[in-house]
Image (tube, rainbow, N blue to C red):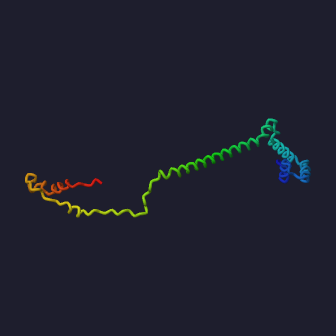
Amino acid sequence: MTGPCPKWEPLLLDRVAGELDAESSRRLDEHLAACAACRAESAALAETLSLAELPPPSEAEKAALAGAHRSALTTWKQSVRRRRSFAAATAALAVAAAAAAFVLAPGLARRAPDMTAPPAAWEVPDLEEAWSVAEIASPSGDAADEAPAGTAESSGDDVLFAELEDVELDSQ
């Protein structure tokens, strides 16, 4: 055989891990006495596991690890205190802003228009009535001011515009 016996391989792993009971250990020892392949596998597993073990800590490592839990706890407590003080400062700022808004708001507030009331109706002016009020008169009779009949200036528009120039418009 080139490798360990498939029946005994799980027991070899259990022995290296230290989880083999007394009866199984006795049977494995009897098999290892007769099987060279399983002996070689057992030795290889033991060597591999020994390489994975860490050496015992030095005095400097022990000293550094001795205060590690206190250092971690202190650091954690400081971070909690910082978060709490930041939250308290934020809450105090919010209260101060609310108080300032409460004090200053009445002076700054303008009366809002009443949006519930219907808008005032806008009346369309009666243009016929407006034109009838302004009497359009014929020219005063001065022949020199009038243009000859049949020309573009005597169409009557000049009379209308002359009357409109006299009308005063409200500036409001």
* Residue 69 coordinates in the image, percent (x, y): 76, 43
Picture quadrant of residue 71: top right
Count of numbered labels shown in the rendering: 0
86 left or right of 133?
A: right
130 left or right of 25?
A: left
Up-down relation of residue 1 to residue 59 (above or below): below
Q: Residue furthest top?
A: 60
Residue shown at 73%/42% (left/top)?
A: 74
Front residue of this view, candidates 141 and 53: 141
Residue shown at 65%/45% (left/top)?
A: 85
Picture quadrant of residue 135: bottom left
* Residue 68 coordinates in the image, percent (x, y): 76, 41
* Residue 105 coordinates in the image, percent (x, y): 50, 52
Front residue of this view, candidates 95 and 107: 107
* Residue 27 coordinates in the image, percent (x, y): 91, 52
Residue shown at 84%/46% (left/top)?
A: 41
102 left or right of 113?
A: right
Quadrant position of the C terminus in the picture: bottom left
161 left or right of 6?
A: left
Front residue of this view, candidates 74 and 92: 92
